[in-house]
Amino acid sequence: MKIARLIFNPIQENTYVIWDDTLEATIIDAGNMGERENAALEKFIADNGLKPVLAINTHGHFDHLLGVDFLRERYGAKFAMNSKDEFLLKGASVSAELFGVRAGDLPENIDVDLEGMDEISFGATTLKVIPTPGHTPGHVSLYESESKVLFTGDTLFRESIGRTDLPGGDYSWIMRSIIENILPLGDEVKIYPGHGDMSDLGHESMYNPFVVEVLNNEVNYKN
């Protein structure tokens, strides 16, 4: 599996294009907005001869949604997201305005519901769908076991975690997601977050202050 990161929109969101030898591609958290960014993504896809078939979102915040309708209309890609986050679609444009972003058209519905799905496939690649609520109720992370790559969205960042003070956020749940659902995948697993630089779980177990304080029993994340 090949991975490219493109950084889009004023929130500096990581959009990932992933593909395999079949040249079918999935775009994770399409954050591209406006003609310039749409053109940049379109050029990358064309230069690599890719066929986008899925636009998968880790969660429903606006900065990760801005390019979804472009992919639907330009390539016929199906939009996949957990329906527990569908309520966020309704207010996404308003949320964008609060951050000073004129969002334009945003998706109002999903094509593929990740709720209850164990995996989702494209080409010759299968991604495991791991529920990781806390930043949002329906947040998921996507794991490709052969490459040992995990797309963590806004749950786990390099030496930080996602916000839990937004609607639907919950500190206890985000830490459960990290400690119980993510870290057991193994120290060697590389993480590709929704913002910032990549890392690996071994590094996060040692240097992420939110993780370390829980592993050292300094914080009871379950209450």
Image (tube, grey):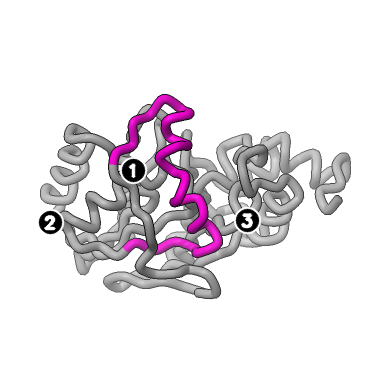
Residue 198 position (above or below residue 98) = below
- Tell me how far mark 1 sits from mark 2, CA to CA: 23 Å
- Identify which amino acid the numbered label 2 is placed on: Gly
For mark 3, give the secondary structure: loop
For mark 1, give the secondary structure: loop
What residue does disc 2 label?
49
Could you tell which of marks 1 and 2 lies nearer the N-terminus? 2
From the viewer's perspective, is 54 left or right of 184? Answer: left
- Identify which amino acid the numbered label 3 is placed on: Pro
Residue 72, given in percent of the width and then of the height, sits at: 24, 58
- Is residue 186 magenta-colored? no
Q: Residues within 10 Å of mark 3 (few under 14, many from 20)?
A: many
User: Are the two marked residues, 2 and 3, in contact with CB atoms closer than 8 angstroms?
Assistant: no
User: What residue span does the magenta drawing correspond to?
Assistant: 79-104
Residue shown at 50% from the left, 64% from the top: 83
Residue 114 position (above or below residue 140) = below
Residue shown at 39% from the left, 69% from the top: 112
Q: As rendered, which of 68 and 43 lies closer to the eye? A: 68
From the viewer's perspective, is 19 left or right of 205? Answer: left
Residue 159 position (above or below residue 151) = above
What residue does disc 1 label?
66
Q: Residues within 10 Å of mark 1 (few under 14, many from 20)?
A: many
Residue shown at 51% from the left, 66% from the top: 129
- Tell me how far mark 2 sits from mark 3, CA to CA: 35 Å
What residue does disc 3 label?
133
- Is residue 95 magenta-colored? yes
Residue shown at 48% from the left, 60% from the top: 142
How many discs mark residues in the rendered view? 3
Nearer the camera: disc 1 or disc 2? 1
On the image, which quarter does residue 102 sit in? top left
- Identify which amino acid the numbered label 1 is placed on: Leu
